Image: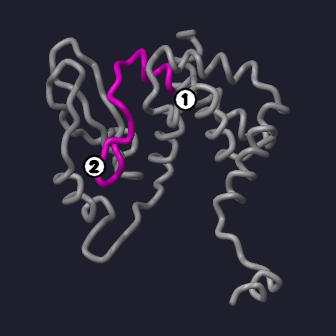
Amino acid sequence: MSKGINAVRKKHKKRALSKLHAGVPVDWVPGGTLFEKTQKQIESAPAPTCHCGAVMVKHQSRYYSELHQRIFYRCLTPGCRTSTAAHPDGRVAATPANKETRDARIVAHDAFDALWKSGVVTRQVAYAWLQRKLHVEHIGHATLEACEDIIAACKVVTPDELRGVRKEVVREERASRPRIATEDEHEDEP
C-alpha cells in the first residue's frame, strides 16, 4: 500500500510546484495581497493540541505559500511528526494525524473521489453514502482504520447502491422543504 501512497504524494507535490513555477498570480486586494489580509485572522486562531499533549505550532506550506496561502499546524515534540491542515483563516481543517494516517487519508480520498467523479452520483450524495455506510462525515477526521474501511467500501460499492442513496437524499430534501398550500386548502380555512 505504501507504493501507491508515495505515488499520490508525488502527484500532489508535482501539481503544486507546477503552479508555483507557472507564475500564477496571487489575488490582490486593497492594502496588499490576500495573504496579508488574512494574516491577522490566522494569528488570532487558536492552535490545536497534539495527541502527545503539546500545543501545535502554525507553519506556512512551502508548496502553496504564494498560491493559496496554505498553512498547517505541526507538533514540535521530538519524534512526533503529527500535523494537520488549516483553512486560510487559521481554523483547523482536519484532525491532527501522523504521517501514516495522513497518507492513508490521501489514498482514501482518491478512492472516494472516484465514486462521484464517475458521474453516477454527485459529491453530496457520495458524502451522504459515506456517512450512512461508515458514519464518517469527512475523511479529514478519519482514523487509520476508518481510512482502510473507506478504501475497502469504495471498492465494493455498486452503482445501484449509490443510486439508492441518491433517491433517499432527494426524498429527504423534499420532505424538509416548506410545503406551499394549494388553493383548495386556502378555501377550507375560516
- Report the front residue among 80 and 181: 181
Three-letter code, disc 2: Gly
Q: Is residue 77 left or right of residue 142?
A: left
Task: Report how far apart the C-alphas of labels 2 and 1 lie in the structure.
Answer: 27 Å
The image position of residue 5, as x and y in percent, is 54, 18
Give me the residue at 50% from left, 50% from top: 22
Give me the residue at 72% from left, 20% from top: 155
Q: Start and end of the magenta stretch?
A: 86-105
Identify the element where label 1 is drawn: loop
User: Which numbered disc, 2 or 1, marks the residue that appears first in the sequence?
Assistant: 2
Question: Residue 135 bears which disc, if any?
Answer: 1
Residue 117: image quadrant is top right
Residue 140: image quadrant is top left
Q: Main secondary structure of the magenta part?
A: loop
Q: Is 93 included in the stretch rendered in magenta? A: yes
Residue 111: image quadrant is top right
The image position of residue 188, as x and y in percent, is 77, 85
State which quarter of the image contains the C terminus: bottom right
Q: How was this image coloured?
A: one colour
Identify the element where label 2 is drawn: loop
Give me the residue at 44% from left, 20% from top: 143
The image position of residue 7, as x and y in percent, is 57, 20
Q: Is residue 147 left or right of residue 97?
A: right
Question: Residue 90 bears which disc, if any?
Answer: 2
Task: Answer above or below: position of 90 versus 113.
Answer: below
Q: Residues within 10 Å of mark 1 (few under 14, many from 20)?
A: few
Q: How many numbered discs, if any?
A: 2
- Report the front residue among 131 and 55: 131
Q: Is residue 13 left or right of residue 134?
A: left
Give me the residue at 40% from left, 52% from top: 68
